[in-house]
Structures are given as C-alpha cells and as structure tokens.
Amino acid sequence: MDDLDSIRPIFFEECAEQLTELERALARLENGEADHDTVNAAFRAVHSIKGGAGSFGMTELVRFAHIFETALDLLRSGKITPAPSVLQIFLHATDVLSDLTAAEQGGPAADPQRTEECGKMLEALSAMPEAEPAQKSEDPAEATPEADDGVPDGFMPVRFEFEEDLSDPQNIPELSEGFEIFSDSPASGNMPHAEAEPPAEMAKSVRSESPCETKTPVLSGPVSKAPVVPVTAPPASIRVDVARIDRVMDLVGELVIGQSALREAFDKNALSIPGESDSSTLSDAMNAIGQLTRDIQDAVMAVRAQPLRTVFQRMQRVVRETSLIAKKRVHLITEGEDTEVDRTLIERLTDPLTHMLRNAIDHGIEPEEKRIAAGKPAEGTITLSAAHRSGRIVITIKDDGGGINRERVRAIAEKKGIISPDANLSDADVDNLIFAPGFSTSETVTDLSGRGVGMDVVKQAIQDLGGRVSIQSEAGKGSDFILSLPLTLAVMDGMLVTAAGQVLILPVSCIVETMMIDRKNIFPVADDMPLMCVRGSFIPMIEIGSALGFSSVSKNWSDKVVLIVEDDDGRTTALVADSIDGQMQIVIKAIETNYRPIAGVSAATILGSGQVALILDVPAVIAGAGKPADISWVKQTGIPSEMAAAESMI
Amino acid sequence: MEKTILIVDDSRTMRDMLRRTLEGAAYLVVDAVDGQDGLEKLEAMNPAPDAIITDINMPRMDGYGFIEGARGKDRGRHIPVLVLTTETSAEKKTRAKNAGATGWIVKPFEASVLLSALKRVIGS
C-alpha cells in the first residue's frame, strides 16, 4: 500500500481515542465496575492499537501491545481478577503504551527499560502459580486481598491455566497463503477449489483447549453468545479537518462584524426613514438577524467544543506518576469531564493543570503518617471537577490535604522580599502570595512539583487564556484552587469607550460599574494618580488616554465617565474615559501575529464601521500607570496604516 | 459489474486501509463500524454485497454475533464472510467457523493476500 502515509494521522488520532477509552475502562474497573463490557472495552482498545500498529510495521508498539493484550485477555477470561495491584500494572502499561505511541508519532523515544520492565510485569500476571480458588465476592478488590505471603509486591495470586500450545501462533494450523478458507462453511460452495483443512489437526487443537475451557471460571457469563448489548448507537459523526472549522469560525466572525455594520447603518438612518411602521418592521428584521448571528456563532462554537475528558484522563497519569515519586498515595476523582470547552482552551490547559496537580500532591497532601495522626484516611484524595457557570468554565482542584500553611508562606514571602515584615495581610492575601513571581524557588518547591516553574507561571498561563485563579484554603482540611475561564478565546463582550479621541474596548467581564464623575469625590493625592471616593472607599483613578500615551494627564475631569474595574486580586481601579459608546460582542484579532505586542493592549477587533479598535489589557494598564508608556507610535501617527487595513487583520 | 464488499471493523485505520486496498482493485466498498451497524448495512445494501470482511473484536456486537446474525438473514446466508483479525487462537478460529465464517485472514494483512483470498471466495 503506497499511500499508507496518508492513513498514519488517522491511526494516531485513533490511538489517542483508544488510549482515552482504555483509561476510562481501567478507571471503571478501579471503581469496582468489573462487568464484561468494561473489560472488553479495555481489551478492544489495546487490540485496535496493536492491529493498526502491525499494519504500519511498528514492531515495538505491536510487541508491547500484544503482551498487554494477552494480559487483558486473562482478565477477560476470568483467569485473573481486577485487583488493585493488577490494575496498577495495567495503568502503568497504559502509560508505556502511550509513550510508545507518542514515540512512533515522532515524540521522544520511550524508555526501553521501563517498557521492558512493564512487559515483564504483564507477562508475570499469566505466569503466577495457581492460587486457591477465590471465594465469590461482590467486591473484586475483596476477593483478592493484597498478597503478603512472599509474593512479590504488586502481584496477585491468580487463577491460571496455561495455554502453552496455543499461545504461540506457530502452533495454529494455517495455510501458507496467509489466509485460510473453511471448507464446509455455508458460503464457500462457490469456491472452485477450497482447501480442506486437515480435520485431524483441527480436532487436536480443539481438544487441546477444551480442558481449560471447562475449568476456567469466567468473569461474567459465557462468551459463546454474541454480546448484543442493548446500547443505543453512538450518534453518527464525521471527521472534519480543523482548518475547515476554523475557516467557518473566521467567516462567522466576519458575519458578526457585517451584522454590526448593518446595525450601525440602520441606527443612523432609522430616524430619516419616513413612516414609523417601516422602520419598526426593519428594526424587527434587524433584531432577528442579530439573534440568528449569535445563534450561528454558538453553533459553530459548539462544533469546536470538545469535552474536557481527554485532559482529565491525562491527569490520571500525572497523579499516578507524581504520587509515586512523592511516595504518597493519592486518588484522583474527576467530575464533569463531559463539560465542553473550545479546543484551543483544551490544548492550553494541560500544562497549568499538570502543574497544579503536582503542587497539590507535593504540598497539599500530607505524608501518610501525618494524615493518619490527623484522623484522615491514609490515601489522599484530589477532586478535579469542571462545570459551566454563568458563561464561564469553572475548573476546581480540591485536595483534602493540610491546607496552606500561612505562617510559612508569609515567612517565605518576607524572606524573599515580596512583602514587608509589617504588612497587614488577610488570609486570602497570604494565600495569593504563592502566585507571586519569585515565590516558588528551588528552596520551597521540590524537584517534583517545581520543575523550574512556579505557581506564578500557572497564574500567567491561566490569565493568558482570559481566566482567573483563586484559592480557598482551610488549615487541616485542604485547599481548593478554582480556575475560571472564558468559554471561548475568539469572541467576547466588549464595552466601547472613547478616550482621547480613540475608540477602545474594555472586556465587559472586568467592569464592575460605570458612573459619571463628581468632582467632589476626587482627591488629588499625587500628580498623576488622584484617588476617587466611591461609597466611602478610596480607589486610584487612571485616565485611559494618558495611560496609553494618547494624551497628557488631563486636569479637567468634567464631562468624563468612570469605569470601575476589578483585577484578578479583587482590587478596584477607576478608569476614566471621555464617553461610553455602547456594548457589543466583538471578535478578537491577535495583534502579535499581525503587528507586534503592545503594552496595555491585549488584542484588536474590527468594528461595524470597518474601523480597527484596540482591546484594552486592563491589568496591564493598571500596572503600567505612572510609568512611561511604550506606545508612543500611537501618539504620533494614530493607528498605523498596516493595522487600519482591515485585510491585514483577517 | 463491479463487486461490492462490506467491511465491518471498528478501527478507522483498518477501514481506511481496507477501503484503499479494495478500491484499488476496483471493488465497491461499504463499511460498518461494528457488528450491529454491519447487519443494518447488510440489510440496506442493494444489491447485497458480494463478500463481507469482518473484524472480531468490536463494541456493541462482535464479529461472531455479526456472522451469526448475517447467516440468520435470507440475504446473508450465502455471502462469503472473511474474518480479518489479529486473533490467531484455534479456539477463536473454530468459533468463527461455527458462527458461519467462510475464511480467516490474519492482521496485519498483505494487500495481495487479501485480494487473492477475496478472489477465491467470490470467484473472479
């Protein structure tokens, strides 16, 4: 097959699906759901990978998948039970299989020693001496208690029959052509010269397996009946190239822009249309189109959406490996893995989640002795859950560890000069110190969760996704890390404001309230940063125009408006603009890819009028206020021509 | 007239590969993702396929179930069914045979082996 290469990507995609399926099945087995379907699903996943890998001549992968499959077959036929120690080996094997697949895909080579060891463990499952007939028990974990009778750690006594003469393909009667036609089958009549299989040989092979057939207790039910399970068929689906969906997404973006242009034109001309009834019909139609546009946008978004399952399943492995290194027993529970998010978000969540889970195991979950002393179960539990909440995705990582040690955090922060020794901090402030740049260093973080990155990097990664991280921690009970993320990275609700003659956009999500300026409430503390009194509390005022370098600091506050914004740490700031022009849904266009990064500006969009408007990076504007602005070009030339040309942004 | 082959395999990789091999040899191909789907496609195909190639390990309904089901239908009774699987055990082979399989091909397959097996069961 010369065009094998074109099937390769399909194979790897399928491998990823099968690995996810395998992890799911093993997770169900861990939860005691040892039904035939689950075991079959696990077996099939490995079997499929093996089958495909064979076609591509991936011998390493085939060899390991074959050993794995053989071990799973022992489980399928009831020769071993899904005891925790057995599942541990299977989970380990899943990781190895995943590594081998990744290696074939051009990733780093799999650790050959690890592969070898894992293969031996799998093979040992079938080589175990025959155990006492296990008592029937509802709980498979109970039926086979941990072995402490000299059996090597990690192995279970298993019920076992060896099929020596059948395990070797050489022993299977086979014709030299590589296929075999059964002579007496119903549909072989029209064959001109069907080769008859030597009846004696067939009979022998049937006989040779019959003893184990009769003696072997089967996991659940005989397999002679086809497992016609009344499962509803999975919904029909097709595979589409991501680029095509992205193209549709882009077009929908254009549609949104076109629609708002229409709206704008209509609003301008509505008054001049003679006859009120005409205008209201037109207005209704306009609203209907607006609604439809939003619906189309949602529908396309739904196409791009993927369940978080793949990421969450990957986290099982992270927890498995990390707890091994940390020598802590940790159980990961995942909830809401069907929650769908935009695929770009999925890809970019893996690293932050990995890091936070490592952090939870390393710093959150206490050592076993400590847990037992505190009256907790020896095994720590981390719950990773996801849910949609008011237009955002909320992902929570909850551990039942010791909670944040605030005294220690404070001490470290003081030592590192992040806070002054006399700083008056609330518990929440102290908790948030772990996100401070420079807080996590090799001294406070072990190799394990550290890996050279601190929690500040996690926070930055989440913020780059338009998200927020918050902590709720209770001493002795554990900590919750809560990530709140936007549903999509491509569209957001924006507030249009004018500052120094430029139309700018603020993300609606960060605006707490808007108000007219009352000069009585302004207190000029410093030259360039006055304070404003809002209901008794003083908040800093920043003029957007001057912060971006559009204009010099204005001393004239009359006729201006204030937008109170809140940053991720809950601090409020009053941003001053000339006017608020309305709210609209905007399509985010990256500036970096078309121009270059600009301090204080996160991205741009195209308004209905075709005009380019910059989207304000609110935290950056607040942080940068008072410092010389980096965007002098705007002051000199206005929007550069290459950006004004709408084509360059699309 | 071109001969039509029904492929029943849960692996997209395998289905794609089979399709290419068979279409390259001027067969028409219809594929199904599991035994259940295979039976439905078999019922729906007009004319009935000239041969069927099926996997064994599949979700919902496995290859044995599919073959038995096909043999239970009027139109499926006489269609040659080749089993294409990585399974090599004699027990499974016997089961497939008892279910009504016409032949057995081991994965990974050589295109030439598959085609010559097909030729044998369909006639040229």
Image (cartoon, helix red, strand yellow):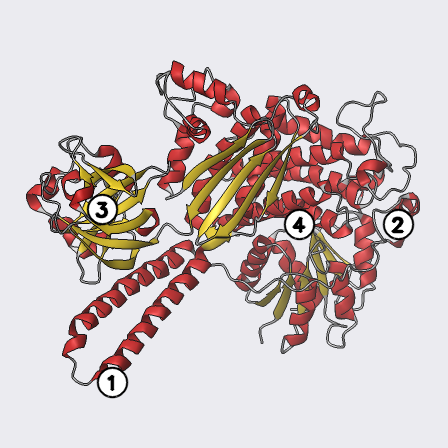
Residue A403 percent coordinates (x, y): 55, 27
Q: Alpha carbon of mark 3 to alpha carbon of mark 2: how far? A: 70 Å
Q: Alpha carbon of mark 4 to alpha carbon of mark 1: how far? A: 72 Å
Left or right: where A82 falls relative to A503: right
How packed mark 2 is, by other alpha carbons closer than 10 Å (few <14, some 14-19, many 20 or more), is some
Which residue is rendered at x = 26% and y = 62% of the image? A257
Q: Give the residue type at disc 1.
A: Ser
Q: Alpha carbon of mark 3 to alpha carbon of mark 4: how far? A: 50 Å
Q: On residue A594, which mark appears?
A: 3
Along the viewing direction, whichever of A38 and A510 lies nearer the viewer:
A510
Q: Give the residue type at disc 3.
A: Asn
Letter of the chain that mark 2 sits on in the rendering: A
Left or right: where A243 falls relative to A157: left
Which residue is rendered at x = 80% and y = 68% of the image? A186
Letter of the chain that mark 3 sits on in the rendering: A
- For label 4, the residue is B107
Which numbered disc, 1 or 2, marks the residue that appears first in the sequence? 2
Which numbered disc, 3 or 1, marks the residue that appears first in the sequence? 1
Residue A201 percent coordinates (x, y): 87, 49
